[in-house]
Image (tube, rainbow, N blue to C red):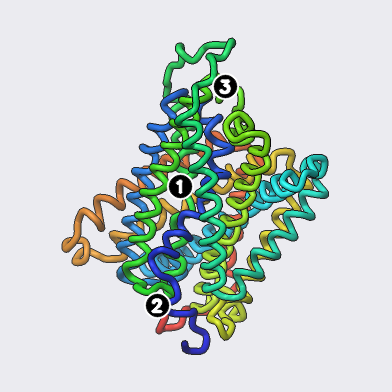
């Protein structure tokens, strides 16, 4: 391993797939969104979850095309810099890092709440001070594991995701085979009517549930096959997630009925039906599943963020100190800087926002839609007329469709976002646009 180089050939296809899966936090994501989806689209939630994977798969294919040509751990930053220039490329990378910072506040909040619940301290789970303290400690622990190197991080992820997946599947299977609960006395499910006003926001929520698959691309330089493993891992993860998400939603809807899920709303579906499906200890067990899910996702959010910052520093668009690596090939400096940013953001949101989870998710959705659209739009320009003529469908048609889809998603997200979310996204974009004007570091010729 050369000085200043990430650890090559350290990540195989299985681990790369686990990174993509764990990043989406399946247990936590399903726990807090199935009720919301039921309230919006009723028993069509499983179908909508499956359909939402289609535009995301298009983005996976766009990433795969770019990665095959330039496997850079900076992903969107590196791939948009060539066709659109340094300023736009930096903005893309900055948005990726900022999106990860914001989603970390969400994950840390969940990890703190469920952590206190698992140990039986429910009063502390509702305390902002206790949430901030627990979330900060868990952040440092997960960052410490990530900073030690990709091998330890990989082992940690395999263990965490295995526990999460086993518990989640066990819950879904129990729901699928259990006798359905009696119809809710409130009724109303039979009259559920799908409208644009309900399908569109539900679709946006469902699309966002898949975010995190791109973690396999962030470790491309450490993969056994840098040009091929990331896209295969991401597609495999998407296949697993479609089955898991749609299957879970179908099982829970069949067991509980739409009306009960509507009553749960944005609450925790796992907690609501834990005792009836998994006995008296079910609540603690499933709270543990959500805790593990949040922790696994937190670590797999730290990994790509640190590598994006490492790539940006390596090319001269962030301070050179962030491009340092340890003897194990870990970008430890970038890891700890990202950890500090996430910690500050988490503390600020816990102290000022009455809806930490909702505001951080909404702001993140805006940023994710933006960098998806920009990266897909870069594909035809990256390859140019000759390259596009060789593979017109993969390099023109699919990228245009994917970019258009996420531009529309961005517009709709802006329309439905709170003022706090819009301000957070605006600050991120404004800072990203201003930074290149404040630095005089040119791109090194060999990194163009």
How far apart marks 2 and 3 lie (CA) works out to: 55 Å
Residue 303 sits above or below residue 364 on the image: below
Residue 343 sits above or below residue 238 on the image: below
Name the residue: 70% across, 65% down. Answer: 140
Lower position in the chain sequence, tag 1 or tag 2: 1
Q: How crowded is mark 2: few (under 14 residues within 10 Å), some or many (20 or more)?
A: few
How far apart marks 3 and 1 lie (CA) works out to: 25 Å
Question: Callout 3: helix, strand or loop?
Answer: helix
The residue wearing badge 1 is 210
Query: Taking the image as drawn, is residue 56 in sight?
Result: yes
The residue wearing badge 2 is 448
Residue lying at the far left in this picture: please name it.
390
Q: How crowded is mark 3: few (under 14 residues within 10 Å), some or many (20 or more)?
A: many
Q: Residues within 10 Å of mark 1 (few under 14, many from 20)?
A: many
Which quarter of the picture shows residue 10?
A: bottom left
Name the residue: 51% across, 55% down. Answer: 162
Numbered mark located on residue 260 in the image: 3
Image position, residue 231 (x, y; %): 35, 61
Question: Callout 1: helix, strand or loop?
Answer: loop
Name the residue: 61% across, 27% down. Answer: 264
Query: Looking at the image, which is closer to me, 73 or 381?
Result: 73
């Amino acid at each position: 391993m050369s000085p200043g180089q990430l650890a090559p050939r350290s990540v195989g296809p299985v681990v790369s797939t686990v990174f993509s899966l764990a990043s989406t936090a399946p247990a936590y994501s399903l726990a807090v969104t199935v009720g919301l989806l039921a309230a919006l689209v009723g028993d069509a939630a499983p179908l909508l979850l499956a359909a939402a994977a289609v535009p995301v798969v298009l983005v996976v294919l766009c990433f795969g095309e770019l990665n095959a040509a330039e496997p850079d751990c900076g992903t969107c930053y590196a791939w948009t810099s060539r066709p659109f220039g340094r300023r736009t490329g930096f903005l893309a990378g900055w948005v990726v890092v900022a999106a990860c910072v914001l989603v970390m506040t969400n994950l840390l909040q969940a990890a703190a709440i469920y952590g206190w619940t698992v140990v039986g301290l429910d009063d502390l789970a509702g305390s902002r001070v206790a949430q901030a303290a627990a979330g900060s400690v868990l952040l440092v622990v997960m960052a410490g594991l990530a900073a030690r190197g990709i091998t330890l991080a990989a082992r940690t992820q395999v263990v965490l995701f295995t526990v999460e997946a086993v518990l989640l599947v066990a819950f879904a299977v129990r729901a699928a085979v259990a006798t359905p609960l009696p119809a809710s006395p409130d009724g109303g499910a039979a009259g559920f009517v799908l409208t644009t006003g309900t399908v569109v926001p539900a679709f946006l929520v469902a699309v966002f549930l898949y975010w995190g698959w791109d973690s396999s691309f962030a470790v491309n330089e450490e993969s056994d096959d840098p040009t091929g493993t990331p896209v295969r891992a991401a597609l495999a993860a998407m296949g697993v997630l479609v089955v898991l998400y749609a299957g879970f939603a179908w099982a829970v809807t069949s067991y509980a009925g739409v009306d009960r899920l509507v009553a749960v709303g944005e609450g925790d579906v796992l907690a609501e039906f834990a005792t009836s499906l998994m006995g008296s200890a079910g609540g603690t067990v499933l709270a543990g599943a959500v805790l593990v899910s949040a922790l696994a996702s937190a670590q797999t959010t730290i990994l790509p963020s640190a590598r994006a910052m490492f790539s940006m520093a390596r090319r001269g668009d962030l301070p050179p100190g962030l491009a340092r690596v340890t003897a194990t090939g870990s970008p430890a400096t970038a890891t700890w800087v990202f950890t500090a940013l996430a910690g500050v953001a988490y503390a600020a949101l816990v102290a000022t926002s009455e809806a930490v989870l909702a505001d951080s998710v909404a702001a993140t959705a805006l940023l994710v839609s933006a960098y998806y659209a920009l990266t897909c739009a870069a594909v035809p320009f990256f390859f140019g007329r000759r390259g596009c003529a060789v593979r017109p469908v993969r390099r023109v048609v699919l990228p245009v469709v994917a970019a258009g889809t996420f531009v529309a998603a961005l517009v709709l997200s802006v329309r439905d976002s709170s003022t706090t979310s819009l301000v957070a996204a605006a600050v991120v974009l404004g800072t990203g646009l201003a930074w290149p004007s404040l630095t005089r570091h040119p791109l090194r010729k060999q990194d163009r």
